[in-house]
Every structure is written in structure tokens, then in C-alpha cells.
Image (cartoon, helix red, strand yellow):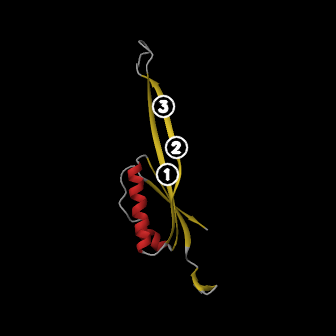
Amino acid sequence: MADIKEKGKEVDQNVQRFRITISCTKLASIEQVTNEIIRNAKDQSIKVQGPVRMPNKNLNITCRRTPCGNGSKTWDKFEMRIYKRYIDLDCVNEQVKQVTAIKLPSGVDVNVIVNK
């Protein structure tokens, strides 16, 4: 019994909720990947929620310019921002494999988690 009728609709029991988390240091790359995933999911008529923006993580490092410590006290400040998005999909395992079969730019991390 793979299918159950629920309120006049057929529901497949193999349908699960997947959360795809995407993180990157380049905003353009993360937008490109999220747009590709959403386009692939909508082509297969998968229920999509997102992309949801998560708070950016700012990493700051302050260091001295002179390696020996002599001279004027000048400082360099470096900052790296990490952007994150997540997308929720309600689909079957095979559909997730097809949706996420895209070419990723360098520096983009993608995690797929199954929520029950």
C-alpha cells in the first residue's frame, strides 16, 4: 500500500521533506545555484519553499602591518562574509538527485538533509 487517500487526494508515502542548505562567500554564486535548483524543481512540479535567507556570518581579522613590530603602529583589517540560503523540497529521493545534479561554482557548499 504505497498510496493512501487523504481528504480526497492520493498521497505517496515515499514523499519526504528535504532541506538543501547552500553557503558561499560570493553572493552572485549563491544566487545562481539557488535559481538553478528552483528552476529544476519547478520543471519536475515539486513543491518548493524558499530560498530563505539566513543571517550572514562576518569574520573579521585585525593584524599589524609590520612583521617586526617596529615603526608606526598601522593595522590591516580583513573581512570575509559567508552567505547562507536554504530550500525545502517535498519529493521522492530520485527527484532530489535529479534536482541537485547541477554544476557548482567553486567555493559553494551544498548540504542535503532529510526531515521527517
**Residue of label 3:** 61
Residue at (58%, 82%) from the top-left corner? Answer: 11
| Disc 1, SS | strand
Q: How many marks?
A: 3
Q: Are marks 1 and 2 in contact (CB under 8 Å)?
A: yes
The type of residue carrying mark 3 is Ile
The foreground one among 38 and 17 is 38
56 in relation to 70, above or below: below
How dense is the environment of label 1, judged by Cα within 10 Å: few (below 14), some, or many (20 and up)? Answer: many
Task: Give whichever of discs 1 and 2 has the lower sequence position.
Answer: 2
| Disc 2, SS | strand
The type of residue carrying mark 1 is Lys
How dense is the environment of label 3, judged by Cα within 10 Å: few (below 14), some, or many (20 and up)? Answer: few
**Residue of label 1:** 84
Residue at (42%, 13%) from the top-left corner? Answer: 72
Q: Position of residue 78 (x, y in %)?
A: 44, 32
In the picture, the disc for residue 32 is none
**Rounded to the nearest whole Å, what is the CA distance between mark 1 and mark 3?**
21 Å
User: Which image quarter holds the C terminus?
Assistant: bottom right
Q: Position of residue 82 (x, y in %)?
A: 47, 45
**Rounded to the nearest whole Å, what is the CA distance between mark 1 and mark 2?**
9 Å
Residue at (52%, 43%) from the top-left corner? Answer: 57
Specify whether 1 is left or right of 91.
right
Q: Quadrant of residue 2?
A: bottom right
**Residue of label 2:** 57
Task: Give whichever of discs 1 and 3 has the lower sequence position.
Answer: 3
User: Which image quarter holds the N terminus?
Assistant: bottom right
